[in-house]
């Protein structure tokens, strides 16, 4: 299958990273190489791109796509939260880092990966195919209580407990083996009236299971806390999120780093001596404009936040 990818907020990302031709830039979510192509276009032969992805198929496809560019390129098969491995590949501080947290178009459109509720496929949803834990284990092995929790917390699904109950009752007869079977269960669990408006009834549940399978929020928390330490002074970290759970983590961690003082609130002045080492480049998150949404509807929920290392 051809690896196609429409990079979200492309122009905004290129501008926000403030790319220096001889700099070192990390694309922590390489995907199809769309954003990395833009970075490489702006780098000289002295510049370096470090492409990171959990998916070996992404690395192979992006490597081929980026081959014509003359900058130095290093590809790392790991998670963007693996700070030590990324630091080792960079050989020190870096000039910029990008995280695009959306599931790549290749993964969504490749039916056999099981990410999409629009295709019938095995219960997989692994971003790293070397991992052994899949959506099958979540759907068929989790208790009703745990299913309710992840569908409610990670999917922000109003009907979480009802969906979990239907899943558990269905799997008593036989395991739930395909995404099509799961979609039918979700549709049966959500009352018809509630299914008439809004997104596809399975969207939130599939999101929740995917997040659980890939431990996405845990990796994100670690990355947002530690990645700014990799930046050189003047270096920037740009993060694109696609749902409120991700955006809340990024916003809160940025705010914590912007206000590191640990003194009790009743203290009239700070005595802990902790001061910030970053500044916000974007006061508010950047969202796609109407022109982008016309040719890339998947960008609709995207938000871009950017910080810069100042000391």
Image (cartoon, rainbow, N blue to C red):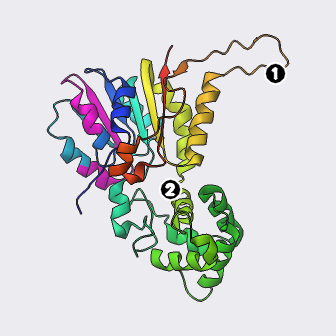
Q: Residue 68: x percent and y percent?
A: 14, 38
Residue 167 seen in this snapshot? no
Q: Is residue 222 left or right of residue 67?
A: right
Residue 167, quarter of picture: bottom right
Q: Earlier in the sequence, mark 2 or mark 1?
A: 2
- The residue sitting at 46% across, 39% down in the picture is 287
Is 100 in the magenta? no
Residue 271, quarter of picture: top right
Which contiguous range is marked in magenta?
36-61
Is 89 or 157 nearer to us in this picture? 157
Please tell me whether residue 252 is drawn above or below residue 64 in the rendered image.
Answer: above
- Tag of residue 214: 2
Residue holding disc 1: 265
Find the distance from the CA under tag 2 to the CA under tag 1.
38 Å
Q: Residue 184: x percent and y percent?
A: 52, 79
Which residue of the protein is positioned furthest toward the bottom in this rendering?
Answer: 173
């Amino acid at each position: 299958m051809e690896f196609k990818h429409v990079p979200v907020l492309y122009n905004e990302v290129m501008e926000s990273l403030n790319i220096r031709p001889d700099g070192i830039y990390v694309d922590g979510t390489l995907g199809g190489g769309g954003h990395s192509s833009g970075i490489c276009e702006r780098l000289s032969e002295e510049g370096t791109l470090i492409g990171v992805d959990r998916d070996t198929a992404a690395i192979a496809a992006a490597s081929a796509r980026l081959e014509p560019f003359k900058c130095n390129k290093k590809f790392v098969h790991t998670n963007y939260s693996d700070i030590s491995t990324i630091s080792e590949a960079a050989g020190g501080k870096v000039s910029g880092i990008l995280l695009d947290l959306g599931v790549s178009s290749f993964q969504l459109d490749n039916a056999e990966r099981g990410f999409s509720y629009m295709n019938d496929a095995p219960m997989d949803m692994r971003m790293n195919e070397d991992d052994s834990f899949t959506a099958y284990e979540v759907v068929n092995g989790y208790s009703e209580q745990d299913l309710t929790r992840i569908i409610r917390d990670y999917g922000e699904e109003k009907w979480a407990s009802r969906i979990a109950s239907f899943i558990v009752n269905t799997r008593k007869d036989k395991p739930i083996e395909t995404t099509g079977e799961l979609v039918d269960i979700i549709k049966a669990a959500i009352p018809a009236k509630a299914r008439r408006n809004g997104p596809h009834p399975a969207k939130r549940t599939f999101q929740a299971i995917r997040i659980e399978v890939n431990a996405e929020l845990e990796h994100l928390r670690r990355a947002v806390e530690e990645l700014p330490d990799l930046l050189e002074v003047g270096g920037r970290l740009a993060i694109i999120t696609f749902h409120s759970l991700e955006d809340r983590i990024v916003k809160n961690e940025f705010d914590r780093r912007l206000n590191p003082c640990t003194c009790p609130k009743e203290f009239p002045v700070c005595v802990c001596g902790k001061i910030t080492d970053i500044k916000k480049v974007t006061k508010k998150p950047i969202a796609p404009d109407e022109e982008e949404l016309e040719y890339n509807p998947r960008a609709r929920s995207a938000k871009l936040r950017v910080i810069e290392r100042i000391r």
